[in-house]
Amino acid sequence: MENVALVVGARGVIGTNLVDHLASLGDWRVVGLSRRGGVDVPGKVRQIAVDLLDPDDTRAKLAGLSDVTHVFYVAYQDRPTWAELVPPNLAMLVNVVDAIEPVAQGLRHISLMQGYKVYGAHLGPFKTPAREDDPPHLPPEFNVDQQKFLEARQVGKAWDWSALRPSVVGGVALGNPMNLAVAIAVYASLSKELGVPLRFPGKPGAYDALLEVTDSGLLAKAAVWAATAPAAANQAFNIANGDLFRWSELWPKIARWFEMDVAPPLQMSLQDVMADKEPVWKQLQATRGLAATSFAEVSSWPFADFVFGWDYDFFADGSKARRAGFHEYVATEEMFFHIFSELRRQRVIP
């Protein structure tokens, strides 16, 4: 039976790699949904521009997708506060399910992308390693509300669901509000252009905290596994690279990759110090022949400040996925260097 994937949020750091991975497998056709749309790949990928917050537009754009078998929901809209995140992010998921369920009679699975916010990781120090059956915390938290919606909606249905919980996701996609690797690469490139060493900008305690991240390619493989493995049905899984690191060990290696000196950490808000750096970015692009990438597309500064402010351990137990049959892993150091190399190949950074 042919697999037809509907990737909701196809232009983000997670969705971009998921679309590419599915298209490479040979037995999948892919439909990507995003606000901006994208370029079709004949016979492989169809891209559709849609406003997921508009139920009428969502129903209209999805009305003809009767052959969809799997929904991969990786969409996200940012808002200033945790409470404000809930209504739009829940509404988008509800609108997609309301639109696709009546027309896709062969629907077999809905995959939901979550994160460690389920464990309260965004609020402060939390129990580590976090496990999928850890007790909940006080709302608001849209990831929890989304899962509750899917659990209730699935009762008595032929399709099942899965929820994946990655750590910070590393990937190349630009224009994403949560792309740490791109933020590091641009921060390093601008520091080098201005002749200053690469300093860790986070809180002092964050430099030695124990962390993990999730490669977007690894996450794509995990999403397909969870959507097709009977052992993964109707469950949540932590998905991370499989190793742990401290910035105090990794940061000097990042500096060496960029051929820069490293200096002691100095806490600063990247959102503040980068506020006047667009002219430097444009000058760097002109002098080094870089691609015409806007400064806004590479400015995930609030998210970088957020991550670099974690002066507490940040990791989860990934053994449940391994026990269920998913055994992939990625070396975190290699992940970062691969992303930097790809950004250089695309002429985003020098």
Image: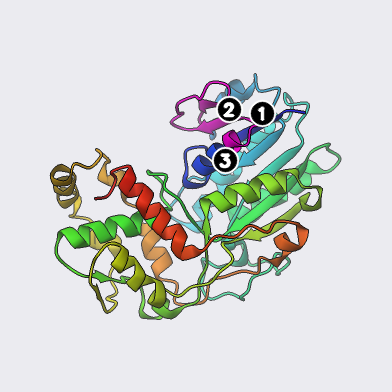
Q: Residues within 10 Å of mark 2 (few under 14, many from 20)?
A: many
Q: Secondary structure at mark 2?
A: helix
Q: State how far apart marks 1 and 2 are (Cα).
A: 7 Å
Q: Earlier in the sequence, mark 3 or mark 2?
A: 3
Image quadrant in which you'd find residue 7? top right
Q: Is residue 167 visible?
A: yes
What residue type is disc 3 on?
His
Residue 217 percent across, percent down from the top left: 54, 49
Residue 87 percent across, percent down from the top left: 56, 46
Q: State how far apart marks 3 and 2 are (Cα).
A: 25 Å
What residue type is disc 2 on?
Thr
- Relative placement, left or right, of 294 versus 1 is left
Q: Earlier in the sequence, mark 1 or mark 2?
A: 2
Magenta region: which residues? 22-51
Residue 311 percent across, percent down from the top left: 44, 77
- Relative placement, left or right, of 245 versus 301 is right
What residue type is disc 1 on?
Ala
- Label number found at residue 311: none
Image quadrant in which you'd find residue 173? top left
Please determine whether, in this image, residue 225 is positioned above or below residue 41. below
Q: Do the residues bearing badges 1 and 2 touch, measured as CB atoms within 8 Å?
A: yes
- Label number found at residue 99: 1
